[in-house]
Amino acid sequence: MLATKNSGRGQPAAASTDYGIGARTLSFLQEQRLEPTPANYSLGYIYLTERKSLAARAVDLILIGGERLDQKRADQITADHVRAGSADGPDQQSAIRHQTLQLSEIAAGATAITGKLNRDLSSGLTALDEGADITAIVRSMVERSRESEAALASASRQIEVLRREVETAKGDAARDALTGLHNRRGVEVEVRALPARADSSLVICDIDHFKSINDRYGHVVGDRVLKLVASSLAKSCHPHLVARWGGEEFIILLNGLSPKDAAVIVDKARLDLSERDVRLRATDKPMGAITFSAGVAALNGRPFDDAVSEADALLYQAKAAGRNRVLV
């Protein structure tokens, strides 16, 4: 196998007068052939700015040996030294801050380009007044105008790329990494967007006997069950918002529906899930029915925490009454 020489191995990319830390981070990711995802961006930023950190040292051990930082090892370093146990917080927020900083740098650079062009034009007009060669001045202005146009076009492209990355980072911060559903942060954003006086309901669901599933089959199977329930709820309750509330709990926002009408939809979702033929992937043996219990409360512009508390209390009543049921 041919090895690709990398001038940046073993040390951070050199600073440039034309690029800030944001561009240096992106350049580092390109050298390592890593996608500019929020997690990779954070790792690259830390590597370039926090040289004594454990993450930077772990990267150095790879690069000094003449190897490239591949995605698998980048993910491992991020999990061990960057995320610090957070499922959806610091890395995305850090990426948003860093990428926004680079947007500012690019915008400032574009402003400087246009300012220089204006100064050059003013100097050319002054030279004309002093009797300078008009052909030479026009040629010079045309050339500088082309250079400025190219530089501004490049800045515009970089801004568009970063804009998409910032939007992706924001979206990731509102999503649960395992199921792809909204997380608590995403739910709070959606609740603020609900019409204050419209009928709306809130449902909290909890998978029945989930701890025994984990204990009996392991967390890998437990994660698959979580994804199965997430997918089933999202399909059965479409177009209403289904989110992972935490652990084995899910929350559903049903805009435009009273608690009674919402309960009909959620109870059908419960039946749809319980009728699925769920089997172990390794042995094809049936696991038995997967069910959930749920509590339904009115939202209708009342404080969100009050509705959550009421739905949660109804959920526990459903559990105490034998599970696998929906209470309003």
Image (tube, rainbow, N blue to C red):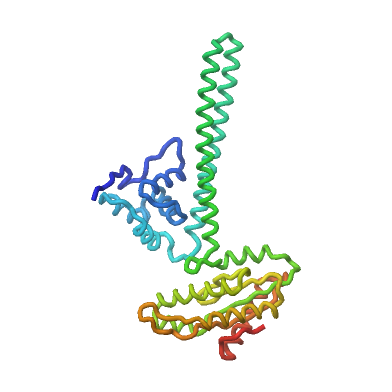
Residue at the extreme bottom of the image, as rendered: 321
The answer to whether residue 29 is above or below residue 292 is above
Q: Nearer the viewer, residue 19 or 286?
A: 286
The residue at 52%/38% (across/down) is: 155
Going 72% across and 65% down the picture, which residue do you hit? 195
Residue at the location (44% across, 35% down)? 17
Residue 327: horizontal and vertical position, in percent?
64, 84
Q: Residue visible at 61% across and 80% down? A: 268
Q: Position of residue 148 (x, y in %)?
A: 52, 29
Of residues 300 and 79, which is closer to you in this image?
300
Single out the residue that lies furthest toward the right: 197
Q: Can residue 183 be seen in this view?
A: yes
Snapshot quadrant of residue 174: bottom right
Please state if 91 lies on the left or on the right of 47 as rendered: right
- Which of the 4 image quadrants contains residue 305? bottom right
Residue 123, placed above or below residue 147: above
Whole-percent x, y for residue 171 in the image: 54, 58
Judge whether residue 310 can be spotted in this image.
no
In terms of depth relative to the viewer, which is nearer, 265 or 223?
A: 265
Residue 51 appears left or right of 194: left
Q: In which quarter of the image is the C terminus?
A: bottom right
In this rendering, the answer to whether 249 lies above or below 30 is below
How far across and how far down the image is residue 193, in percent? 67, 62
Figure disc tally: 0
* Residue at the extreme left: 1
